[in-house]
Amino acid sequence: GASGAGSSATVPVQGVSKLEYLNVDTYTKCKEIADSRNKGLVIPDLATWRRLRAEGGGKLDIDFPAAPAGQQWARRVWASDGGLFTRKCYYPDNDTDKDLSDIKIGGEVAYGFALKP
C-alpha cells in the first residue's frame, strides 16, 4: 500500500540525516574534529558513501555549506580510505573518487562529514 512506499522512501533521508558536518579542511584536521566531539563519529569510507548514494536512488543530497565569498570549493567529501600520505575523496554528484594529499601542511581540502553511530 501507499504507507509501505512512504516508509521505504525515508531510508535515504535517514542516511544523510545521520551525517554531521565537521569542516572544510584536510582529512587529518576533519578526523581530529570528529574525534574531539566524543560521539563516536566516523568519517565514512567510499563503500559507505556509495551505499548512501544508492539508497538515495542514485543521488546523494548533501547539504554542503557555502564557501566564503570569492572562494569555490569542490563538491567533494572525505572518505576514510587512504594510502601513503593520501586519502580518497568522493564526488557524490557523479559517483567518482580521487586521491588527495593528506599531509599536515599544504594538504588538500574537502568537506568533512562524519556518520553518527
Image (cartoon, rainbow, N blue to C red):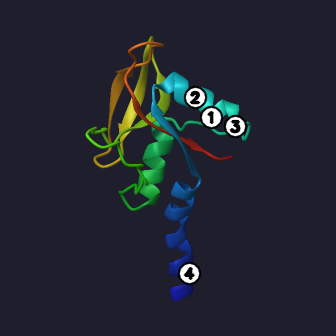
Residue at the spot of label 2: 31
Residue 106: x, y in percent?
A: 38, 15
Mark closer to the chain start, 3 or 4: 4
Q: Is residue 11 visible?
A: yes
Q: CA distance from mark 1 to mark 2?
A: 5 Å
Q: Secondary structure at mark 1?
A: helix
Q: Hey, what amino acid is under mark 1?
A: Ala
Q: Is residue 35 left or right of residue 16?
A: right
Q: Hey, what amino acid is under mark 2?
A: Lys
Tally of marks: 4
Instruction: Tell us which disc is closer to us: 3 or 4.
Output: 3
**Do the CB atoms of the residues marked 3 and 4 lie less than 8 Å apart?**
no
Q: Secondary structure at mark 2?
A: helix
Residue at the spot of label 1: 34
Mark closer to the chain start, 2 or 4: 4
**Do the CB atoms of the residues marked 1 and 2 lie less than 8 Å apart?**
yes
* Labelled disc at residue 4: 4
Badge 3 density bin: few <14, some 14–19, many ≥20, Cα 10 Å:
few
Q: CA distance from mark 3 to mark 4?
A: 36 Å
